[in-house]
Every structure is written in C-alpha cells, then in structure tokens.
Amino acid sequence: MWETKEACSGFSSFTVTTDAVYITGKKGDTDVLTAFNQSGKKLWEVPYGKASDSNYPDSRSTATYANGKLFVVSGEGDMVCISTSGKIIWSVNYFKNYGASAPRFGISESPLVTGNLVIGTPGGSKASVVAFDVNTGKVEWETPSLNEGTQYVNPLYVENKGVKMLVTVTTRSVIAVRLSDGKLLWKYDYESLNSQIGGRRNHTNTPLYRDGSLLVMNGYTQVAVKLKLNGENEPVAEWKNSDLTPHVGGAVLLGNLIFSSTHDTNSSGRWICVDWTSGKTLWINDWHNKGPIISADGMLYIMEEKTGNVALVKPSSSKLDVVSKFRITKGNGPYWAHPVISRGRLFIRHGEYLAVYSVEAK
C-alpha cells in the first residue's frame, strides 16, 4: 500500500491510531518520534532524548498511545509525553533520578499506561517501579528498591482475584506490585530455576497472562515457567518447559496453544508450539530462523530475523503450517521489529524502512 525510508533506524514497532502512524528511531545520537499519515506522508518528527550507546543502539521503545497523548522512553531513560502534533508536554529522566543503570544492551522498555498512570521500571538504588501522572509527569508512587536491575521487559497489567497489579521481570525475580500504591505484593525467585545455566541470562519477553496464570519465558536456555497466581500471595509453579526459549521474538497464545521460537544460539533458532495446560512441547520445526511472532483474526504472522522472510501461518498442534510467504529485502540490520496488524493492514519495519501491506481477504 505504501513504503518509505523516511523513518530513522530502530527495532521498535509501529503505533497505529485512526489518524496517524507513529514510530521511534535513532537519528545521530538522539531518539526521535516520527508521525506519518495513513497514506505514508511524513507529518512531523520530534527529538525526545539521548539514544543508547550500547551494542545495538537503535531505538527500542515503542510509543504508547493513550487519551490523545504519546508516551516514549529514550535509550538513556527519558520518560516523555508528546502530543499528537509533535510537542513535548513533559519529560523526566527516571533512570537518572532513581540512581538506575541501563542494562547491558540499553533500555528497551515501552511505557505502560493504565488509568491516569504511566509506569516505568528503573530498577535502581532508589526504586524498582515508578508511576507518573499521565498529564504532568508528577510521581504518584514508588516501589522501594529491591537491589535488582531492570531488564528488557515491558511491565504487564494484571487483575487477579480482584487485585489490580503490575507484573515485571528483574535480573533475578518475577515481581508484582499493587497498582494503587506500588506496594510489593510478591517476588518469585526466577533465578533459582536457572541456577545451573552458565553465562548471561537476559530477560527480554513480557510474560503472557490468562485465567489466573502467568507464563514467563526467555532465551539463553532459560527454563519457561507457568505460574498460578493467588491474588496478593506468592504464586506457585504449574509447569516448567526447557524447550520454550524465545530470544526477542515473544510468544502468542491462541486457544490452548502457545506459539513462539527457540533461542538455539544468538544467530539461530526454530519455531515451537507448547500446550498451555500441560506445558508439553507439541512440535519444534525449522523455518529459516527464529524471530518475531504476532496474531490476528485467528492466524499467526511470523518474520524470521536473519533474512526477512515473512509467513502467514495457520495455527496447528502438529506442525508449522505455512499458508503463504514473501520476503522483505529493503532496509538494514536484524529483523527484530514486531510486525503490527491494524484494520486489514500489515505494518512491517526493517531499520529505517517501513512498509504497509493490505491483508484483507478479497
């Protein structure tokens, strides 16, 4: 439908509204937010903070749209509220303010907005989680420091047994804090599941939640665990699975099936299906390489990270059932940006290259 190279380089995803398309990117040593109209015409571009200087410095934070405002996080920890006309409303460097250090590969958090709060997880010496007022940037509450660093995970809103909470993953733990005041509700020792694993253990995937259960899974040969939540009390493990190891591609839950990928090495992986109830691995199939996965209208969309092959996949408990495929050849760098589906359109990013396809049935 349209394509452009007017975006700046990044691994973040599209934010699509009825009026516009927004995307973050790195320009020089600065992170910028760019707006396009629905036909691909560039509307404006605004710098909002210093970019990361890590190994992969391109922008990672996907803009969050809520109540006519956009919220982004820079590579150096600036939480910024921006109007839909491209004006900065407020900005606060919550990493600097809370004595936090960026993780090894840079800050990758996207803001969580719920009600009148926008949530950040600095994980510093002063606070683990912080809630800001969406209109002013004023601090509403702070979760005291756990002396555990932040990771590459977006906080997740969960309501369980009448308790509204925020769940995230630190360097060692899965934690939940109460939404109303930031009180730490529980901490699950995720590190103990992987104590025999050597090397680094980065946490890169936001957990999945459904019907009182939380699925935590990450690459680097870490064990996936499904936790049964119990309101404000510590959860218990329902099952563990050593095959389910998504690197940066995430996972999708459709019906009773979890679809994801494996992190065999940093440059290779396969596709996997696991039963939600039992935790049993149903299949692991090769298809080019690991990568991002999303779903829409009961179908899966996957894009392998090495050479840009994109596939439409029919969910199956017996195999990776590829219906159709094509390849993205423009752009640069790894294909890490998750595709987005909106109103019959497929949005794909590869570095500074953006492309939008019609996927509606004819």
Image (cartoon, rainbow, N blue to C red):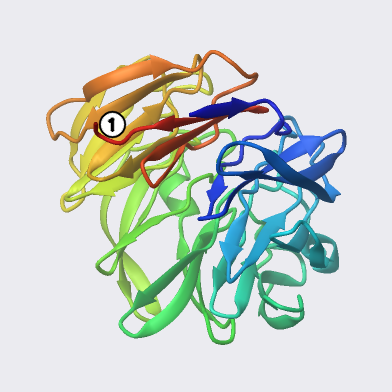
**Which secondary structure, mark 1?**
strand
Q: Quadrant of the C terminus?
A: top left
In-front residue for pair 234/162: 162
Write down the quadrant of residue 94 in the picture.
Answer: bottom right
In-front residue for pair 237/13: 13
Outermost residue toward the left? 318
- Percent coordinates x, y for residue 190 in the rendering: 46, 55
Task: List the residue tagged with mark 1.
Answer: 272
Q: Is residue 275 left or right of residue 193?
A: left
In-front residue for pair 347/131: 347
Total number of numbered discs in the rendering? 1
Q: Is residue 152 left or right of residue 159?
A: right
Q: Is residue 287 above or below residue 196?
A: above
- Percent coordinates x, y for residue 181 in the rendering: 58, 86
Write down the quadrant of residue 263 in the picture.
Answer: top left
The amino acid type of the residue labelled 1 equals Ile
- Percent coordinates x, y for residue 58 in the rendering: 72, 34
Any part of residue 293 in sight: yes
Q: Is residue 274 left or right of residue 53?
A: left
- Percent coordinates x, y for residue 247 in the rendering: 48, 34
Q: Is residue 74 above or below residue 178?
A: above
Query: Quick one: label 1, few (<14), some, or many (20+) residues within 10 Å?
Result: many
Any part of residue 106 in sight: no
Residue displayed at 28% across by 31% down: 272
Residue displayed at 35% across by 70% down: 235
